[in-house]
Image: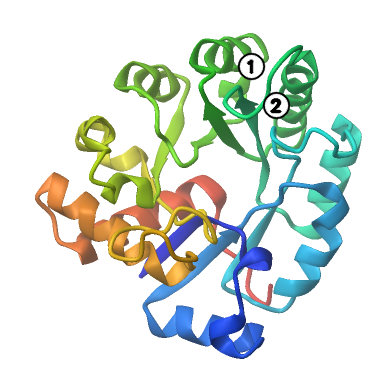
Amino acid sequence: MLVDSHCHLDRVDLTPYEGSFQALMAAIRDSGVGHMLCVCIDLEEFDAMRAKVAGESDVSISVGVHPNEQAAREPTVAELVRLAADTGAVAIGETGLDYHYNQGDLDWQRARFRVHIAAARESGLPLIIHTRDAREDTIAIMRAAGAEQAGGVMHCFTETWEMAEQALDLGFYISFSGIVTFKSAESLRDVARRVPLERLLIETDSPYLAPVPHRGKKNEPRYVRHVAEKIGELRGMSADAVAELTAENYFRLFGKPQAGA
C-alpha cells in the first residue's frame, strides 16, 4: 500500500474529473494509494478542508498555518491544541521557516514556528515542518523550543545531508517529494540514499511539484508511486518494498486511523 504523507487534497485540480471530488478519490485508490494526510496551511480554510474530506476513512488531516501565509490570522497554542483535539487531526502543521519567498523582518515567522512547536508538545502530536533557505534558524528553533519532545517530519525535504542528520538526531523523519525525480536534484538523491530506512517517508505535496514524468503538470496523490520508484532505484529496492516500508513508517509516526473514522 502506498501512503501519501503530505498532500493538499482541497487544492487538487478537479477539471480532469469533471469537477467530481469522488472521481478523483476513486482514481487515487485505483492507483494503489491506501492513505493520505491532507495538510492544513491556513486556519481560515481549515473548515472547508475538513468538509472536503469528511467521511473519507483513508484521509487524515493536520492543523496549522504555513510560514508563507504572511497575511493569515496568527494561531495561538490553545487554539491549535483545541482544533486538533476537536477534529481528530493527527499532526500540527505545516509550520516552519521559509526565507526564500519572505524578505525583511521575519520575527513573525519565527514566533509562529515556536507557537506550533509548543502546540505539538502540549497536544502530543507530531510536527510537519517546512523549511527553505533557513537551515540554521530552523534547527536552532527546533532545539531551543524542544521540538524533539513532539517529533515529526521534515516534509518535502530539499536541504543538505548535514541538515538531515541534525533533524534525524532530534528524532524526525525525512520525507521526499517528486523533487527527488528531477534531473537537477542529484544532491537531494544523495540524501535519499543515506536516510535510515526506518525514518523515510514519501509524499506528493500535490497539487504542487509533480514528479517526472508528469513534471510541469498539476500533481495528484496517485503520482506518489513515481517517488517510491525513484527511492527504490536509489536504494536497490522495489517500488512495492518502498511503499510498504514508508507506509509502516507513516503509521508509526502519525498513528493508524481509528475504526469508523
- Residue nearest the viewer, comparing 247 with 252: 247
Q: Which residue appears at 47% of the width and 84% of the height?
A: 27
Can you tell which quarter of the image residue 11 is in? bottom right
Mark 2 Cα-neighbour bin, 10 Å: few <14, some 14–19, many ≥20: many
Query: Residue 113 got which mark?
Result: none
Q: Secondary structure at mark 2?
A: helix
Percent position of residue 2, x then y: 37, 66
Residue located farthest toward the left when viewing the structure as drawn: 236
Q: Position of residue 38 (x, y in %)?
A: 62, 59
Q: Callout 1 environment at 10 Å: few (<14), some (14 to 19), or many (20+)? A: some
> Where is residue 128 drawn, in percent x and y?
59, 39
231 left or right of 52?
left
| Dots 1, 2 in contact, CB < 8 A | yes
Judged from the image, the secondary structure of the residue bearing numbered disc 1 is loop
In the depicted structure, whether residue 163 falls above or below residue 12: above
- Where on the picture, by quarter, is residue 241? bottom left
Q: Which mark is residue 146?
A: 1
Is 157 rendered above or below residue 216?
above
Q: Quadrant of the N terminus?
A: bottom left
Tell which circle, 1 or 2, labels the residue nearer the N-terminal end: 2
Query: Please, what is the three-letter code of the amino acid marked with disc 2?
Result: Ile
Q: How many marks?
A: 2
Residue drawn at the location 18% of the way across and 54% of the way down: 232
Q: What amino acid is found at the position of numbered circle 1 in the picture?
A: Gly
Task: Give the alpha-carbon distance from disc 1 to disc 2, as whole Å.
Answer: 7 Å
Residue 239 x %, y %: 21, 63
| Vertical relation: 141 (above or below) 158 | above
For disc 2, the marked residue is 117
